[in-house]
Image: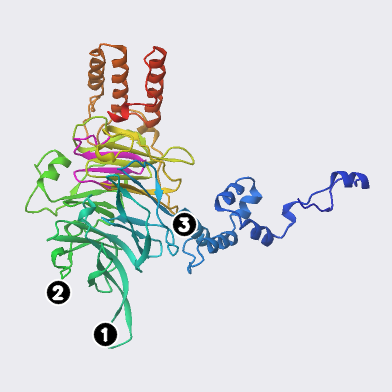
């Protein structure tokens, strides 16, 4: 500790008193540049904690000069400091929080592992796992190719750390692959990018043009490229359809949807041909709509407009029946005609599975629709829903993901922690801790990173992307007081009954099941199973299971440690 005397505001002390007491100098008397230089050597976590101690340290720790030094220390190869109001702070936090975590469903190891983080990556914006590898897009448009190793250990398939990575391409805006959940079908990777293109052959003048490049996921080799006119600028790409009739849907900056059809079975043949770019019907018949984002699966596409409206394209009768419960309005001769969903509020983002979907509105409410055979809607039962139905015990999710027959929700459990909830089929370990699945969203046995922002699940592995952007926040609003309380709404349609979800009938059925048990031990076990079925929050379920264990032990039942209900 360094102390030195300075002019005091109080009475002059004696020489002996000065020697005994001393008068340490305030840190505010140091030059601000020196304080910022010293603080910049702190780890990011300690820097943030120091900034919360007082107003002076908050201003010093939030200075752009401090974050510039930290950013250069974290990413010395980063040439551009990024963009936005606070470019250096944004860049530093992006590179400090970036990470890709994965947890294998099979094998004995049930914990998250972290893959190799490319030093050149400027944060993580998007990722996509394929059969053998993982592709990651950063915030400056660099697409990285992480080569993984899938090995067999004691008869179980285990994912190892990414052994190495390479830069697949630069200037990428978006990328997509086969929309099916099974990564075996991810043979090609479609990359939407911007490239310099010569205006006239033989001259040096060039102009930036958007293009779609197709790569083999196994080797990263480019096998096909299509270039568009410089007046066409796109921001998102998704795929829909079969391999022989693969439709590429491209979203322009103005909110219009264009499509073209390619035959994937002929992409590896060395030839040149022209494909036709056509305006999609959702933009042709509804020109006033401005699409903000889109998502797709093999046989359907979902569009979200900038005003929060949702429009659907369904191309097969089976999926249409699963989503809407009827084939009354399905036209097999006009499969691209968009269908509008009836919604009471603005939708912010969505997720689309094979035959079910999830929507999140501006108030943070989650709505599910479609097939519910395995309980993948999280409504507490296994009844199909032909219209969006609210999951009442979940609010304000960070992200939502729908798979083949299960759903995952990443939520904020407290101020500094996150948790992963899941429902539906649990076969193959896809719901860690719940091997037999659950009809309601339950807390999974996954340690979620603090800055988790996106997730994806394959047949073999669960992936969680970690990256924090200080300029991106989900603009949730508070629900108006007039709509907080009132009659229950199980769906977004009109004419909902007072007990639309059959809650009273379900409770009577649960009581009859408990009454049919002959011993107290059996009744306790049955009650634990019922708690797992009921649409309760994860904390409420944990409370009931712990209370039932205490009662069971008090009666001499010798209850097992931890709830057995996840296996029911």
Q: Are marks 2 and 3 in contact (CB under 8 Å)?
A: no
Label for residue 200? Answer: 1
Please rate how many residues cluster around mark 3, counting C-alpha atoms within 10 Å: few if below 14, some from 14 to 19, many from 20.
many
Q: How many dots with numbers?
A: 3
- Nearest the viewer among 126 and 76 is 76
Whether residue 474 can be seen here? no
Alpha carbons under labels 1 and 3: distance apart: 40 Å
The spot of residue 288 in percent (x, y) is 24, 57
The spot of residue 393 in percent (x, y) is 34, 32
Please rate how many residues cluster around mark 1, counting C-alpha atoms within 10 Å: few if below 14, some from 14 to 19, many from 20.
few
Q: Is residue 480 above or below residue 469?
A: above
User: Which residue lies at the image location 39% right of the left edge and 25% below the top edge?
Assistant: 561
Name the outermost residue toward the bottom: 202
Q: Is residue 553 above or below residue 245?
A: above
Question: Quick one: quadrant of the C terminus?
Answer: top left
User: Which residue lies at the image location 28% right of the left edge and 82% below the top edge?
Assistant: 199
- Nearest the viewer among 13 and 109 is 109
Query: Quick one: label 1 or label 2, which is nearer the N terminus?
Result: 1
Which residue is identified by label 2? 273
Q: Are marks 1 and 3 in contact (CB under 8 Å)?
A: no
- Dot 3: element: helix
Q: Quadrant of residue 482?
A: top left
- Nearest the viewer among 416 and 390 is 416
Q: Which residues are magenta?
A: 351-378
Label for residue 94? Answer: 3
Please rate how many residues cluster around mark 2, counting C-alpha atoms within 10 Å: few if below 14, some from 14 to 19, many from 20.
few
- Dot 2: element: loop
Q: Is residue 399 left or right of residue 244?
A: right
Alpha carbons under labels 1 and 2: distance apart: 20 Å
- Dot 1: element: loop
């Amino acid at each position: 500790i360094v102390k030195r005397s300075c002019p005091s505001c109080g009475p002059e002390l004696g020489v002996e008193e000065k020697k005994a007491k001393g008068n340490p100098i305030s840190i505010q008397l140091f030059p601000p540049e020196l304080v910022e230089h010293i603080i910049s050597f702190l780890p990011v976590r300690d820097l943030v904690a120091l900034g919360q101690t007082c107003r002076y340290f908050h201003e010093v720790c939030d200075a752009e000069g401090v974050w510039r030094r930290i950013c250069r220390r974290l990413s010395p190869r980063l040439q551009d400091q990024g963009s936005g109001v606070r470019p250096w702070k944004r860049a530093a936090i992006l590179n400090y929080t970036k990470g890709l975590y994965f947890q294998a469903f099979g094998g004995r190891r049930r914990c998250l592992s972290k893959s190799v983080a490319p030093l050149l990556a400027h944060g993580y914006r998007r990722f996509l796992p394929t059969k053998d590898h993982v592709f990651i897009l950063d915030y400056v448009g660099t697409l990285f190719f992480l080569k993984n190793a899938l090995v067999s250990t004691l008869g179980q398939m285990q994912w190892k750390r990414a052994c190495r990575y390479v830069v697949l391409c630069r200037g990428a805006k978006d990328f997509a692959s086969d929309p099916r959940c099974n990564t075996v079908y991810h043979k090609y990777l479609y990359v939407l990018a911007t490239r310099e293109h010569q205006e006239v052959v033989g001259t040096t003048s060039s102009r930036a043009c958007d293009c779609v490049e197709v790569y083999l996921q196994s080797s990263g080799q480019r096998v096909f490229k299509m270039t568009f006119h410089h007046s066409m600028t796109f921001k998102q790409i998704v795929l829909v359809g079969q391999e022989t009739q693969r439709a590429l849907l491209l979203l322009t900056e103005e909110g219009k949807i264009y499509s073209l059809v390619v035959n994937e079975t002929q992409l590896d043949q060395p030839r040149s041909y022209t494909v036709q770019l056509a305006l999609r019907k959702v933009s042709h018949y509804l020109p006033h709509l401005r699409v903000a984002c889109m998502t797709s699966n093999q046989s359907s596409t979902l569009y979200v407009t900038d005003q929060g409206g949702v429009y659907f394209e369904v191309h097969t009768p089976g999926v249409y029946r699963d989503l809407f419960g009827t084939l009354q309005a399905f036209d097999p001769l006009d499969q691209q005609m968009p269908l509008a969903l009836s919604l009471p509020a603005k939708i912010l983002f969505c997720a689309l599975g094979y035959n079910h979907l999830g929507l999140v509105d501006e108030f943070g409410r989650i709505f599910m629709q479609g097939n519910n055979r395995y309980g993948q809607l999280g409504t507490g039962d296994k009844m199909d829903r032909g219209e969006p139905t609210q999951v009442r015990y979940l609010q304000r999710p960070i992200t939502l993901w729908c798979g083949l027959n299960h759903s995952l929700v990443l939520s904020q459990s407290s101020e500094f922690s996150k948790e992963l909830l899941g429902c539906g089929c649990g076969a193959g370990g896809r719901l860690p801790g719940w091997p037999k699945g659950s009809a309601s969203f339950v807390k999974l046995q996954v340690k979620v990173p603090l800055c988790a922002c996106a997730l994806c699940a394959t047949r073999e592995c669960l992936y969680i992307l970690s990256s924090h952007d200080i300029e991106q926040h989900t603009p949730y609003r508070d629900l108006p007081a007039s709509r907080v309380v009132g009659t229950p709404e199980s769906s977004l349609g009109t004419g909902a009954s007072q007990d639309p979800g059959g809650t009273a009938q379900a409770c009577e059925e649960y009581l009859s099941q408990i009454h049919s048990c002959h011993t107290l031990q059996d009744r306790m076990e049955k009650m634990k199973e019922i708690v797992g079925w009921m649409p309760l929050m994860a904390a409420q379920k944990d409370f009931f299971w712990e209370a039932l264990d205490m009662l069971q032990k008090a009666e001499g039942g010798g209850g097992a440690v931890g709830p057995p209900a996840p296996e029911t």
